[in-house]
Image: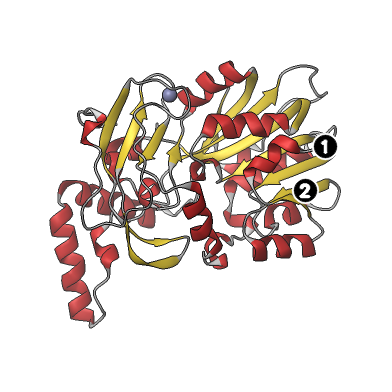
Amino acid sequence: MRGPATDIDDTRTPNNSRNLGIKIKMTCPDCDSADLSRIGAIPDAFEFAGTKLESPLAGGSLIRCNTCCLHWRSPQPEKAELDALYRRGDTGSWQYHPVKRLDWQITTSILRKNHGITSVLDVGCFDGRFLDHLGADYHRAGIEVHPLAAEQAASKGIQIIGNDFSDLDTLSTQFDVVVAMDVIEHVSNPRKFLESLAKATRLGGLIIVSTGNTAAWPWRLMGSMYWYCRIAEHISFINPRWCKYTARNLGLAIENSITFSHEPSMTLPAFIQATANMFYRCFPNLAHNLRRGYARCKGTPYRHTFLTPPHWRSAKDHLLVVFERSGMTLPFRIVADEKLGASQSV
Ligand SMILES: [Zn+2]
């Protein structure tokens, strides 16, 4: 991250922000290291899972563990509070068309090219759209917290086997492949989450995780103001270094690591997003005033989001990692389509 990181003693909640049972973590939630750095302040959030909040949710600070390289938001709402916010969330927030989800395409390509795979568990499957896209050739199961979304997934033929990540630890069945796409950033203890995914995976099977990548250069440039970490429901952030450290500790092998853009854009929109972010990075107050002035000219109401950094969805700031649960290996090799426009490194 750019700029000097400071001691985490600076971690405070702004007085005008909502307090949600705040617990300041003085050690890393993953490796328990006390060697931490504060990257900077995360702007307060005004909506959660697509639903406007009655009062802003405190952004807190972005913290980095210098041992395992996990990054996280501190303080964080308690799990019960987060679960309640998710249940009130807008079901339209996570509805994507499969063509627009490069991680879905990469994962589908890997699965279809490896004939030894017959069962797939999607953790955080939402309305079952990914598994539906994958097709009925597999035994498809899902875990989903949102009751309406889980119902919709079940109507697509997906077997819902749980509604909470903790259900992973008590499953009676193991799967050839367990996927968690755009999920790990929502959990407070990613190492424990990856361990639970591994428990649900059969020996020699695969665990596929996709999420934002703190090592991507746009994120390093913007630091704690990066659009991905200002989203209130995103609380933990990983990178290739964390994956290597944690895989080694859990006895997993990394078969592949692929970087990609969550929303690839044409040159002009990508240029505009990059320019807007760099402008905000240098002149956040001026950016706020310009947004407010523009709204006045257009006769549109003032929005609190004028205070927050602009999105940068075109940035190549996402990571898909294929872990293998050690032991007897499945009779296949990991191959993804090169035409998908993603970069691979093992
Ligand atoms: Zn750590």
Residue closest to the far bottom: 299
Mark number, residue 287: none
Which residue in the protein does label 2 denote? 141
Q: Quadrant of residue 194?
A: top right
For residue 278, side relative to residue 132 (left or right): left
Q: Mark 2 is on which residue type?
A: Ala
**Which callout, 1 or 2, points at the residue further toward the start of the chain?**
2
**Where's the C terminus, which quadrant?**
top right
Choose between 301 and 23: the one closer to the eye. Answer: 23
Q: Quadrant of the N terminus?
A: top left
What percent of the width, then of the height, locates residue 232?
40, 53
Q: Residue at x 20, y 28 (%)?
A: 4
- Percent position of residue 253, x then y: 64, 19
Which element carries disc 1, helix, strand or loop?
Answer: loop
The residue shown at (66%, 66%) is 148
Regarding mark 2 in the picture, which secondary structure is present there? strand
**Other residues around mark 1 within 10 Å, as few (<14) / some (14–19) / many (≥20):** few
Q: In this view, does 60 lie above or below 345?
A: below
**Image location of residue 244, percent across then percent down:** 53, 20
Q: Compared with residue 183, is residue 96 higher up or lower down, i.e. above or below?
A: below
Q: Residue 173 carries which label?
A: 1
Q: In this view, does 140 lie above or below 97?
A: above
Ligand 1 lies in which image quarter? Answer: top left
- Marks 1,2: beta carbons within 8 A: yes
State the CA–CA distance, disc 1 to disc 2: 11 Å
Label 1 is placed on what type of residue? Thr
